[in-house]
Image: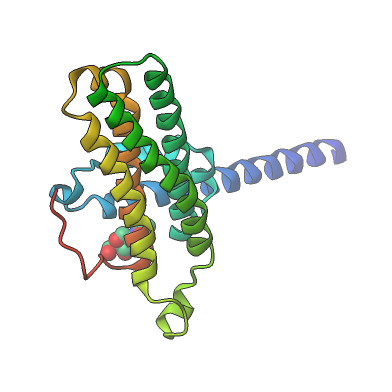
Amino acid sequence: MAAARTTSSALLLFAAAVVVLAAHATAAADLVSQACTNATRHFCRLQLSKDSCVSALRSDERSAAARDLRDLALVAVDLVGASAAAADAAISAAAAKGGGADTERSLQYCRVDYDDMARTVPDCRRLVSRYDAAVVEADGGPPSQYYFGCVDRLRDSAVGCWDQVRNWAELKKAVGKEVRDVVQRANVAKLIQEQMLGMENPFESLHD
Ligand SMILES: *[C@@H]1O[C@H](CO)[C@@H](O)[C@H](O)[C@H]1NC(C)=O
């Protein structure tokens, strides 16, 4: 009897643990899904679909453990850095193969963009990691403009290289996917950070 009771209590405990774990996983999954639903509500803004937003964030398993929008924004900023490093490597490989003076110049220009990003990502990360909604609301923290400014710089660099590559069929074939990925992830970071801040950048006019 006693043994049977112990077994069933153990089973019960196990079942409870499974339920708790599942609930935790669902909550985190919902955060990604909800944040992306909210972030991509106005599709025409950056042409980012909810699915692209979700799959970008889920490509980093830490998004499943994110407790809030700041955690997600940090994951998004890191993804920008990782994709920029991957694109930079692709650019180096393409440059090593040589080519015309025009494509060479475009690749060189992309190196400048990615050098900028490599230096800026850790700064944006530090800024976001210290974000505290309560402090910002009490007007004691850095104004939202700093957050917008940092991630917008990343996005400008990402778009800068894409603008170099998009019109050269040969370059587009060689590095287009990687370069485009950086833009998409910069868009995710920008939109998720807006969710974190609870607003869009009031000083910008988006032209694409
Ligand atoms: C998404 O937006 C809804 C409605 O404004 C809000 O209640 C919810 O907290 C938001 N979710 C996230 C994860 O930002």
In the visual, does 45 lie left or right of 134?
Answer: left
In the visual, does 8 lie left or right of 35?
Answer: right
Residue 200: percent from left, percent from top: 25, 65
From what the image shows, is residue 37 above or below residue 129? above
Residue 9: percent from left, percent from top: 75, 43
Tell me, yes or no, if residue 195 can be seen here: no
The colour scheme used to paint the residues is rainbow
In the visual, does 191 lie left or right of 140?
Answer: left
Quarter the N terminus occupies: top right
Residue at 36% over, 42% down: 113
Figure quadrant, ligand 1? bottom left
In the visual, does 186 lie left or right of 7?
Answer: left
Q: Nearer the viewer, residue 198 or 126?
A: 126
Residue at 25% over, 35% down: 162
**Quadrant in the picture for residue 79:** top left
Residue at 53% over, 67% down: 130
Residue furthest to the right? 2
Number of dots carrying numbers: 0
Residue at 59% over, 48% down: 20
Residue 71: percent from left, percent from top: 50, 55
Residue 175: percent from left, percent from top: 32, 23
Tell me, yes or no, if residue 128 can be seen here: yes
